[in-house]
Amino acid sequence: MSVPRPAVEVRDAGKTYRRWARERHRTLKSVLLGGRSRRAAENGVVALDGVSFTVAPGETVGVVGANGSGKSTLLKLLAGIVRPTRGTVSVEGRLAALLELGAGFHPEISGRGNIEITGLLLGLTKKEIAERFDAIVAFAGVEEFLDAPLRAYSSGMAVRLGFAIAAHSDPDVLLVDEVLAVGDEAFAHRALEKFSEFERAGKTLVFVSHDLHLVAERCRRALWLANGRLAADGPSGEVVARYRERVAAEEGERRARVEGTGRRVGSGVATIERVRLLDASGRAVGLVPSGAPATVEIVARAGEPLADFVFGVEIATVAGDTVFGTNTALEGFRPERFAGEARVALEIPALDLAPGLYALDAAVHARDGAPYDYRRDVLRFEVAPRRPGAGVWSPERRWAFSGGVAWRE
């Protein structure tokens, strides 16, 4: 039994966009003989770098990654809009692509006319367009604007029409870039139903989306692009989980380097020089797993020796709701002397917070509350999920059952 050819095959594909330097003074002779300026910038923009994968007929594949990771460039290579700088890209069968809002539409021509022109460009005959015309219009929901020029359409209407034409052109391979991002709820349902029809009919679908839940739910497989390279290729749930972990870790590192955005008040008799959140190994972090140990480190300096001082910490949601707060006076510490630089650490054996983003305040003040240095929202950190739940507290917990109740293994 022969093995079917891949619907999509990409081998060591790379795409570099050149930056061309502007020349202020060029002669007519140099333009005619030299054509385009050959003074390219020293470094081009590498959009894709050595990407390889195949897609079997009938697969639905999601493509995820940050902005600028090469997702749209990949779809343009598959669509034949741009050619790879190196490597090969091949697609078997009839191809339909919806990569940009209203791409290929003429703004001065009516929706009716654009359906006919775009259908022809996608390989349909005039008879096939006529047979599918009503279904295209109903799917797009543009009946009232059918004879209006396309420039009168909203971006959502234009993308609905473009998707409807592409989906009804009976393609073997459909490429879609963020089509659900601009549609309304009803259109999103129709588009997802169409995706299911494609899958049942053995069609191949490759789509880019920032909706990670959609990719994990609707695709058996996902590609993750990072800086133009293929970072992962596998089951969609696993790839999406790895991508989310990477994003959370990078955001955590960024928060560990950047101070919060809140205000600072106080007399300045003593100042807080630095506040960090440390993990169990003593490394400054901005992301902590729920239930893991953490330490709030405060480095403070007294301009003159003090016998009256209190150090305090408060954790709140970014919406401003206090989660926890304490200070050295509440904990029973009696001040004696604070001079020069000091390190104060609040050790938390288990940071039992629910997943989410939190803000931290730090203060040094007198026992009567007069602030020396109060730093509100001095840093932010994220708590990563350990298990699902609601609220801001995620304690260690277990269930116990007895009597007439049983659970499956």
Image (tube, rainbow, N blue to C red):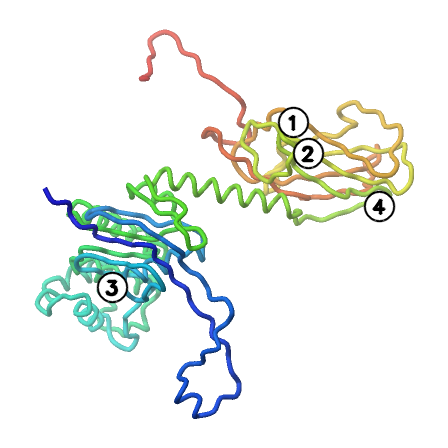
Mark closest to the chain's N terminus, 1 or 4: 4
Mark closest to the chain's N terminus, 2 or 4: 4
* Dot 2 alpha-carbon crowd within 10 angstroms: few under 14, some 14 to 19, many 20 or more: some
Q: Which numbered mark, 3 or 2, is in the foreground of this view? A: 2
Q: List x then y, in percent, for residue 290.
A: 54, 30
Q: Secondary structure at mark 4?
A: loop
Single out the residue that lies furthest toward the top. Answer: 403
Q: Disc 1 to disc 2, how far (Cα)?
A: 8 Å
Q: Which numbered mark, 3 or 4, is in the foreground of this view? A: 4
Single out the residue that lies furthest toward the left. Answer: 127
Q: Which numbered mark, 1 or 4, is in the foreground of this view? A: 1
Dot 2 corresponds to which residue?
296
Locate residue 374: give its quadrant: top right
Mark closest to the chain's N terminus, 3 or 4: 3
Dot 1 corresponds to which residue?
348
Q: Disc 3 to disc 2, how far (Cα)?
A: 57 Å
Residue situated in front as seen by the camera: 222 or 155: 222
Q: Which numbered mark, 2 or 4, is in the foreground of this view? A: 2
Left or right of 228? Residue 358 is right
Q: Secondary structure at mark 3?
A: loop
Dot 3 corresponds to which residue?
142
Dot 4 corresponds to which residue?
268
Mark closest to the chain's N terminus, 3 or 2: 3
Please name the residue shown 30% across and 54% down the image. Answer: 11
Please name the residue shown 84% across and 33% down the image. Answer: 309
Q: Disc 1 to disc 4, how far (Cα)?
A: 28 Å
